[in-house]
C-alpha cells in the first residue's frame, strides 16, 4: 500500500510521521477481456487490496460482484449473471470508485447433461438436459454433420426432433460462445432397406440371400412365418426357405428395432418321388419316377449324372420316364423342377443274372431279327408273351416292302416295328434304339395301349416294365413249331409255324 509523509511543527521542532495513503482504486486491465457468466476474471490496477465492491454495468443497470484473492495490484472476481454484450467494470473502496474499463459478457457456456432415449428413429423426439440451454441456436447430429434439427426448450430440457439425415454419433449444440457436443454417442435407428433377394424363387431348404443395409438385429418372416437367420453382417442376411404346400407369392419381411422392409419371393413345394419303375437303377435302361408336385420338371438328378427335360422319354403330370445314363452310381435321385430340387430318394443299381439288371442286359447288338418270311425274305422278330405270339416285321428289300419306320425320340433314333401284317389281335409296336448301324439294346413297347420300357437281355429275350403300373413283362423268343431253336424261312400262316415256350418271369 502506498503511504504519505506528515510533517508536524511542535515547539519549533519538525516531527515526521508515516501513515497509509487512503485513495480510490485505479484499474488498468481486465484479463480476459471477455467471459461468460460464472467464469472467473482478473482485474489489474492499483490500490486493489482494500476494494470492497466490484460493479458490472452501465446505463443504469448494475450487477454487484464480490472480489477475492486480492493483492495491491490485482483481484479476481466471478462474472455475475449478466446479459451478453458490452458493459463496464468498476471497483470501489471507502475512498471512492475507480475508473471504468470495458468488458464483453459472452453467452453462458452450455453445460450438457444426458439425453434420452439413447437410440431413436429419424423423426422421433429425444430430450436433452443441461444448463444454459436458452441460448442454443442450432442442434446437429452425427458429430455436427446432419442438417439442423428442430428443437423446443422447456425449462432446462431441450426437446429435439431427430432429423431425416441424422447419423449416429455425438449430438452437437451451438450458441454464441461456440459448439458443444455430448460425450456420449446417440444411436440413430435406421429402418432396414432391401434391394435384392436371391434366388427369387425356391423350395424348402434353399439358401436365400437378402441384401441392402441396416439389417442388424433383424428377424425374418415369410408372410406370417418366422424363419431362423443363418448369418447377418448388417448388409447381407441369409436364411433358408421354409416349407410350402403350394406355389405362392410370399412377402419376405425383415423386421428390426428401427422398422421393417419387405420383398417378394415365390415359394413352392418340393417334388416328391413316391414310386420308381423299376425299383432300382439299370444304366442304359429306363427309369420311371412317379410322385407329386412335379411342377414343370427341368431335370432328373442322380448321384453323379443327370438327365435334362429335353431328353425325357415321357413327361406327364407327376410322372417322368428317363434313360439312366451310363456310369450312373447308386445314390440319391431327385426331380428338379422350375423352383428347385426335390426330396431325395435313394436308389441302388439292380444287380443279378436274371431279369432286368445291370449285369443281364445286352448292348451293341448288330441285329434284332432272327428269322425271315416267305420268298420276300422279310426279316422278323417273333416273341411270346403269356401265350400270345408277337411278330414284328422289318423291311423286305427283294419285294420292296416297308414294314418298319424311323422315329426320333428325345434326340435319339429308333427303328419302329409294328405288328400289323398278321393282325393277331395283340396290338403291339416295338421301338428299338439305333446307334449307327447297331442297336443299343434299349426297347420301348406299346402293348395294349400301355407303354413299357426295358432292354434286350443276354439270352435274347426282352425284359420290360410298365411306366404306368410298374408291372414287369418278358418277351421270350418264339421257337419253331417243328422243334429246335433255329428260325429260318417261315411258311404262312406264321401262327402255325411257331410255338411259345415257358419263359415268363
Image (cartoon, rainbow, N blue to C red):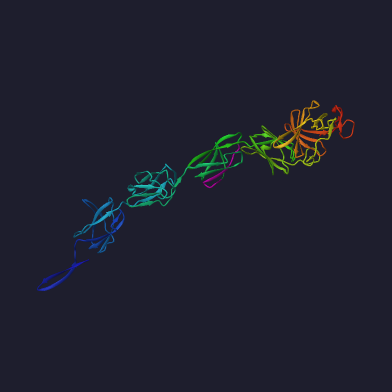
In front: 95, or 55?
Answer: 55
- The magenta stretch spans which residues? 231-243
Q: Residue 150: percent from the left, percent from the top? A: 37, 43
Q: Could you say which quadrant of the image residue 466 lies in?
A: top right
Which of the two residues, 258 or 388, is positioned nearer the viewer here? 388
Q: Is residue 389 above or below residue 336?
A: above
Q: Residue furthest left?
A: 12
Q: Is residue 20 positioned above or below 430 on the image?
A: below
Query: Is 237 one of the magenta-colored residues?
Result: yes
| Viewer-nearest residue: 486 or 306 | 486
- 76 w.r.t. 288: above or below: below
Residue at position x 78%, y 35% in the image: 463
Q: Nearer the viewer, residue 170 or 3?
A: 170
Residue at the bottom extreme of this rendering:
13
Q: Quadrant of the N terminus?
A: bottom left
Quarter of the image holding residue 280?
Answer: top right
> Is residue 76 covered in magenta?
no
Q: Is residue 43 visible?
A: yes
- Left or right of residue 406, residue 147 in this image: left
Q: Position of residue 297 (x, y in %)?
A: 65, 36
Residue 301 found in image quarter:
top right
Residue depicted at x 51% and y 42%? 195
Image quarter (top left, top right, bottom left or bottom right) of the C terminus: top right
Residue 489 placement, left or right of 64: right
User: In the picture provided, is 190 more to the left or to the right than 502?
Assistant: left
x, y (%) of residue 393?
80, 31
Taking 497 as reference, is 463 left or right?
Answer: left
Q: How many marks?
A: 0
Measuring from the top left, give residue 102's x and y in whole percent: 24, 56
Residue 49 visible (yes or no): no
Query: Which residue is located at x 90 percent, y 32 percent?
Result: 483
Amino acid at each position: 500500500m502506498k503511504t504519505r509523509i506528515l510533517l508536524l511543527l511542535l515547539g519549533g521542532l519538525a516531527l515526521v510521521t508515516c501513515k497509509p495513503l487512503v485513495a480510490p482504486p485505479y484499474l488498468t486491465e481486465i484479463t480476459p477481456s471477455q467471459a461468460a457468466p460464472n467464469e472467473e476474471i482478473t482485474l489489474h490496477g492499483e490500490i486493489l487490496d482494500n476494494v470492497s465492491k466490484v460493479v458490472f454495468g452501465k446505463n443504469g443497470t448494475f450487477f454487484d460482484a464480490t472480489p477475492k484473492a486480492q493483492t495491491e495490484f490485482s483481484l479476481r472476481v466471478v462474472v455475475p449473471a449478466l446479459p451478453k454484450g458490452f458493459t463496464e467494470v468498476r471497483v470501489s473502496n471507502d475512498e471512492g470508485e475507480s475508473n471504468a474499463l470495458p468488458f464483453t459478457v459472452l453467452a453462458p457456456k452450455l453445460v450438457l447433461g444426458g439425453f434420452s432415449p439413447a437410440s431413436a428413429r429419424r423423426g422421433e423426439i429425444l430430450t436433452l438436459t443441461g444448463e444454459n440451454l436458452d441460448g442454443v441456436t442450432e442442434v446437429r447430429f452425427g458429430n455436427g454433420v446432419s442438417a439442423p434439427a428442430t428443437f423446443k426448450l422447456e425449462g432446462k430440457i431441450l426437446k429435439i426432433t431427430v432429423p431425416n439425415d441424422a447419423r449416429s454419433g455425438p449430438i452437437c449444440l451451438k450458441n454464441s460462445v461456440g459448439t458443444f457436443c455430448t460425450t456420449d454417442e446417440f444411436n440413430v435407428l435406421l429402418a432396414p432397406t432391401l434391394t435384392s433377394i436371391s434366388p427369387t424363387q425356391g423350395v424348402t431348404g434353399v439358401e436365400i440371400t437378402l441384401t441392402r443395409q441396416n439389417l442388424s438385429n433383424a428377424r425374418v418372416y415369410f408372410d406370417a412365418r418366422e424363419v431362423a437367420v443363418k448369418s447377418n453382417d448388417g448388409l447381407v442376411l441369409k436364411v433358408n426357405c421354409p416349407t410350402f404346400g403350394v406355389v405362392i407369392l410370399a412377402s419376405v419381411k425383415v423386421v428390426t428395432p428401427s422398422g421393417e422392409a419387405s420383398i417378394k419371393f415365390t415359394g413352392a413345394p418340393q417334388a416328391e418321388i413316391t414310386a420308381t419303375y423299376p425299383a432300382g437303377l439299370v444304366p442304359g435302361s429306363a427309369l420311371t419316377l412317379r410322385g407329386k408336385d412335379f411342377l414343370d420338371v427341368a431335370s432328373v438328378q442322380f448321384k453323379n449324372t443327370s438327365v435334362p427335360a429335353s431328353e425325357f422319354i415321357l413327361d406327364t403330370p407327376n410322372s417322368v420316364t428317363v434313360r439312366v445314363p451310363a456310369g450312373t452310381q447308386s445314390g440319391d435321385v431327385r426331380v428338379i423342377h422350375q423352383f428347385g430340387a426335390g426330396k431325395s430318394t435313394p436308389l441302388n443299381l439292380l444287380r443279378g443274372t436274371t431279369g432286368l439288371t445291370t449285369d443281364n442286359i445286352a448292348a451293341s447288338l448288330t441285329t434284332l431279327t432272327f428269322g425271315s418270311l416267305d420268298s420276300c425274305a422279310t426279316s422278323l422278330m417273333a416273341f411270346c408273351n403269356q401265350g400270345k405270339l408277337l411278330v414284328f416285321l422289318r423291311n423286305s428289300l427283294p419285294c420292296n416292302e416297308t414294314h418298319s419306320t424311323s422315329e426320333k425320340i428325345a434326340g435319339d433314333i429308333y427303328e419302329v416295328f409294328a405288328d400289323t401284317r398278321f393282325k393277331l389281335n395283340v396290338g403291339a409296336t416295338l421301338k428299338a434304339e439305333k446307334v449307327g448301324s447297331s442297336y443299343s439294346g434299349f426297347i420301348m413297347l406299346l402293348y395294349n395301349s400301355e407303354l413299357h420300357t426295358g432292354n434286350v437281355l443276354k439270352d435274347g429275350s426282352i425284359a420290360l416294365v410298365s411306366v404306368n403300373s410298374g408291372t414287369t413283362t418278358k418277351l421270350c423268343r418264339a421257337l419253331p413249331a417243328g422243334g429246335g431253336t433255329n428260325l429260318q424261312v417261315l411258311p404262312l400262316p406264321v401262327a402255325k409255324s411257331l410255338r411259345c415256350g415257358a419263359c415268363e418271369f
